Amino acid sequence: MTDNENEHVKLAIRITDMLCQLNEGKALDTKRLADKYEVCRRTIQRDINERLMIALPMLGLNEKGLYALPDDYFGQLDDNDIRHFSMLSGVSDLFPNMDRQFLRRILNENAKSVYESKGQFNEDGTKFKALFEQLEPAILNRHKVTLYYKGRYHLLEPYKLINHRSCWYLAAVKDEKLKAYRLSFVKDVVVHSDQHIFQHSKEILTQLEAEESIWFGQDKQEAILTISAEVADHFRQRSLLPHQQIVKEMDNGALLISSQYVSSLQLLSLIRYWMPHIHVVSPDSLQSELMDGLKAYIN
């Protein structure tokens, strides 16, 4: 096991500890937290900037220079708030139940010998603080926004901020179509006045609820793949491919799986990750693109 393999679980435990302290009216001392978790103060500061302050914008410094919530927030976070916070901070899928009782259990010393997480990647969220501060009220108040995105200005109706595979996107409507705009490519935001309020579309809200990725409103293709018995349990336990469905379980323990995708980019990196235990049955175009990419890499 490498030093980085359980970094995500350590991050989750630090964040939940800080969340519980804040909800109890305590202030966060970065030095004490760094000593407690045997990390540098810069790591604790990054936890606060990238996780806590994005999900809890009311968090600030008190007169002693410690991070604290306003007095009227003490004890006000219920289980729904905690689950919502864990989703925004990127740790919602780490543990089976994110409520106050479970958080207390994982903060227990014994949890270190029980829980572990491997191979997680999270986009640096510090640079998005200003964007969140602009976009959150715009979404809540249904104000149109203009983004400078990939060299062009876009007038949008913002609906939701989405964390997909540890990267942040704005789901917004342009020309009556729902699209996803990755925040790392947004260079400027203008929030328009009350004269530019829009009404939510029920169709768009339904689409947001139904789509599990950020490829909105595009026709999907079906891929059929075989999964070897050696790794089949991973695919039985959770969906590792877009819109994954198990078509058939083979006598030898292998799986025949269906995946719905919009772009080959959604699938190819996942297929390469699971090679040689995964094989494309159809379509032929996906298999050809996979082989061409591998040949280009070898050459």
Image (tube, rainbow, N blue to C red):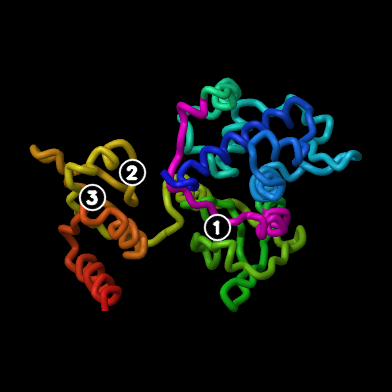
Q: Is residue 51 magenta?
A: no
SS type, badge 3 = strand
113 w.r.t. 154: above or below: above
Disc 3 packing (10 Å; few <14; some 14–19; many ≥20): many
Which tag, 1 or 3, sits closer to the chain's start? 1
Badge 1 is on which residue? 169
Badge 2 is on which residue? 239
Q: Position of residue 235 (x, y in %)?
A: 28, 42
Q: Is residue 125 magenta?
A: yes
Q: Label 1 to label 3, Cα distance in Å?
A: 26 Å
SS type, badge 1 = strand
**Region of the chain picked out in magenta, as a range:** 111-135
Q: Is residue 131 visible?
A: yes
Indicate the amino acid at tag 1.
Tyr
Which tag, 3 or 2, sits closer to the chain's start? 2
77 w.r.t. 47: above or below: above
Badge 3 is on which residue? 258
Q: Position of residue 295 (x, y in %)?
A: 24, 74
Residue 192 occupies which quadrant of the picture? bottom right
Judging depth in this view, the residue of 151 and 292 nearest the camera is 292
SS type, badge 2 = loop
User: For the point 15% across and 58% down, which residue is it?
Assistant: 281
Q: Position of residue 41 (x, y in %)?
A: 71, 46
Q: Label 2 to label 1, Cα distance in Å?
A: 21 Å
Q: Is residue 227 left or right of residue 129?
A: left
